């Protein structure tokens, strides 16, 4: 019971600390590896907040991948902060979530989480809370399910 309370407390503290970080700019290549680049401005956007998409940007495969890539950097930073407290921590998490036509996310579930020590549950629990706050550009024709794996290890 005490361990669970400690894990919950650390999860909350990590989520709160995420709100102080800012993202500047991400350059994303489309999936066809063409020379075309889309620049997504994310000035002063706290993790999990709605990104400032250029007017007219709508949901498609490229913006979906760009959003996951941008937000995955936030998850990696969360992992790194946890790993500092628990040196050697590493693991893999696969989550499934639904992106609605308005760009909101719902139904975040963990399909698999494998950590080398119990402290990894801090990252898993925080990951769910953060992904629930993600937003994508609006415009999908229908709700879209995404299964996303992450590998967390200090590089």
Image (cartoon, helix red, strand yellow):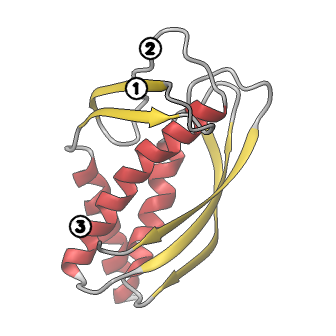
Asked if residue 100 is positioned above or below residue 17 in the image, the reply reads: above
Tags 3 and 1 in contact by the CB under 8 Å rule? no
Q: Residue at x 39, y 21 (%)?
A: 52
One can see residue 104 in this view = no
Residue 40 tag number: 1
> Who is closer to the viewer here, 103 or 36?
36
- Residue 104 lies left or right of residue 133; in this view the side is right
Label 2 or label 3, whichever comes before in sequence order = 2
Residue 65, how many percent across, how many down? 56, 41
- Quadrant position of residue 138: top right
Q: Residues within 10 Å of mark 2 (few under 14, many from 20)?
A: few
- Residue 106 lies left or right of residue 1; in this view the side is right
Element class at badge 3: helix
Q: Residue at x 66, y 28 (%)?
A: 60
Q: Residue at x 66, y 34 (%)?
A: 61
- Quadrant position of residue 47: top left
Tags 2 and 1 in contact by the CB under 8 Å rule? yes
Residue 8, how many percent across, how many down? 37, 71
Asked if residue 18 is positioned above or below residue 119 in the image, the reply reads: above
Element class at badge 2: loop
One can see residue 108 in this view = yes
Give the distance between the C-alpha atoms of the residues marked 2 and 3, in whole angstroms. Answer: 31 Å
Residue extending farthest to the right is: 142
Give the distance between the C-alpha atoms of the residues marked 3 and 1, in whole angstroms. Answer: 26 Å
Q: Determine which residue is flagged by label 3.
A: 81
Label 3 or label 1, whichever comes before in sequence order = 1
Residue extending farthest to the top is: 55
Q: Determine which residue is flagged by label 2.
A: 54
Q: Residue at x 61, y 19 (%)?
A: 58
């Amino acid at each position: 019971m005490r361990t669970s309370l400690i894990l919950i407390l650390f999860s909350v503290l990590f989520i709160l600390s995420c709100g102080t970080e800012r993202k500047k700019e991400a350059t994303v290549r489309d999936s066809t590896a063409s020379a075309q680049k889309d620049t997504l401005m994310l000035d002063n956007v706290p993790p999990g907040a709605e990104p400032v998409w250029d007017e007219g940007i709508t949901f498609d495969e490229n913006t979906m991948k760009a959003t996951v890539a941008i937000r995955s950097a936030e998850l990696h930073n969360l992992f790194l902060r946890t790993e500092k407290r628990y040196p050697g921590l590493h693991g893999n998490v696969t989550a499934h979530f639904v992106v609605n036509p308005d760009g909101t996310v719902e139904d975040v579930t963990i399909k698999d989480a494998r950590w080398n020590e119990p402290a990894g549950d801090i990252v898993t629990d925080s990951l769910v809370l953060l992904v629930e706050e993600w937003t994508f550009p609006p415009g999908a024709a229908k709700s879209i399910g995404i299964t996303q794996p992450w590998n967390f290890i200090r590089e």
